[in-house]
Image (spheres, rainbow, N blue to C red):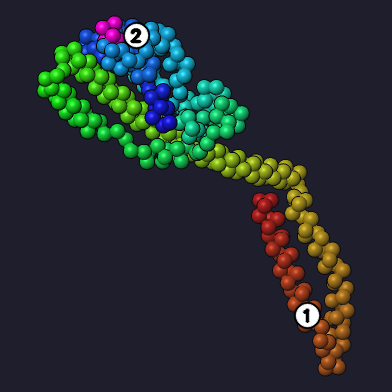
Amino acid sequence: MDVCMLEEDLPQMDGTCDACEPDEAESALWMCVRCRFAFCSSHADAHTQSTAHTLQPYSSAEADTHSAEPQAAALPPDGRRETVSVERLKCRDHGQEGALYCKHDQRIICVLCAVQGEHRGHQIITLREAYLWQKSKEGIDLLEQTHEISERIKAKWASPDMSMEELEAYVNQQFDELQRLVRLEEWRVLHLVDLKEAFLTAQAAEKISEISAHTQTLQEEMDSITHTLQQMEQVEEDGGAPAALLAPLLARREEDAGGRAVRNTYKHTHTHSTKTGHTPAGYERVLQVEKREQQMISVDTDMISVNVS
């Protein structure tokens, strides 16, 4: 199945005969849908005789192949490949970023394609998994294939049983096969480039999203701090201290006022006990609590002074 899919995903032709010499190529009049090669009139006859494949007029065959052309292997009519970009890897049906991969159709797809599109129910994997899967496939050794084809042609050339017409048809068939292998390998390599670009772009987008969210949080915190400072400056201009900072201190002083009467009672008792030579057991604890509270009041006062200034 993989081989058939690769054949269907071969790049488009440039409008000239693929069997002619590149410098003297004639315009393509016929196209073999099975092989995806375009031929002039003379080479079309030779291809039909050697392979028995059915040919279609080049214009209609080209239209059919364009309609079935997958995005990963698409090439412009001039044969030159677009520059790899995020825009080129977007889903053509939904306009979203290609974030997933359909293993069944070997195509980069978007989330909507996987959920409700034509790829629903297919085996869907991540772009990174797809890249590693395609990369693990063994590529076509074009040098070895060229050598084997050359040896087969030499053997047929030396055969006394072959006529010139049969030899010419055989050579054309072998070169057609070599061109098919070249295009398959071209598709595989370019598809790997697409996959690597796609998953690296997805990773970069995810990182950018995380950074943007973190930046937004920091901005909100900075706005809150700025607002607080502005309020403090306004309070300072009005001649008062920030209420939020004064409230804890006032509450603590109210507690101190209630506890001061208790401490005075202990002090009176301590004075009396000193004269008699007896010290209450709780008096030392009261002195320690009073000392700590005085230290806390001093710290709060310093903080208010610093913030107001």
For the residue marked with disc 2, what is the amino acid?
Trp
Residue 273: quarter of image: bottom right
In front of the other: 47 or 114: 47
Residue 300: quarter of image: bottom right
**Residue 66 position within the rendered picture, expressed as x and y whole percent measured from the top left:** 44, 15
The answer to whether residue 279 of the structure is visible from this angle is yes
Quarter of the rendering occupied by the N terminus: top left
**Residue 246 position within the rendered picture, expressed as x and y whole percent measured from the top left:** 77, 55
Q: Is residue 241 above or below residue 155?
A: below
Mark number displayed over residue 241: none
For the residue marked with disc 1, what is the amino acid?
Arg
Q: Are marks 1 and 2 in contact (CB under 8 Å)?
A: no
The residue lying at 49 percent from left, 32 percent from top is 104
Mark number displayed over residue 30: 2
Given this view, does label 1 or label 2 mark the residue nearer the observer? 2
Residue 174: quarter of image: top left
**Residue 16 position within the rendered picture, expressed as x and y whole percent measured from the top left:** 30, 10
Q: Is residue 301 above or below residue 107?
A: below
Q: Residue furthest front?
A: 161
Q: State the extent of the magenta-drawn residues as a range.
A: 41-45
Q: Is residue 3 above or below residue 65?
A: below
Q: What secondary structure is marked by label 1? A: helix
In front of the other: 29 or 89: 29
Q: Is residue 186 above or below residue 136?
A: above
In-image side of 301 versus 125 (left or right): right
**Residue 59 position within the rendered picture, expressed as x and y whole percent measured from the top left:** 40, 7
Q: Earlier in the sequence, mark 1 or mark 2?
A: 2
In-image side of 160 versus 18 (left or right): left
In front of the other: 186 or 90: 186
Q: Which residue is mark 1?
A: 285
Was residue 42 drawn as part of the magenta stretch in this picture?
yes
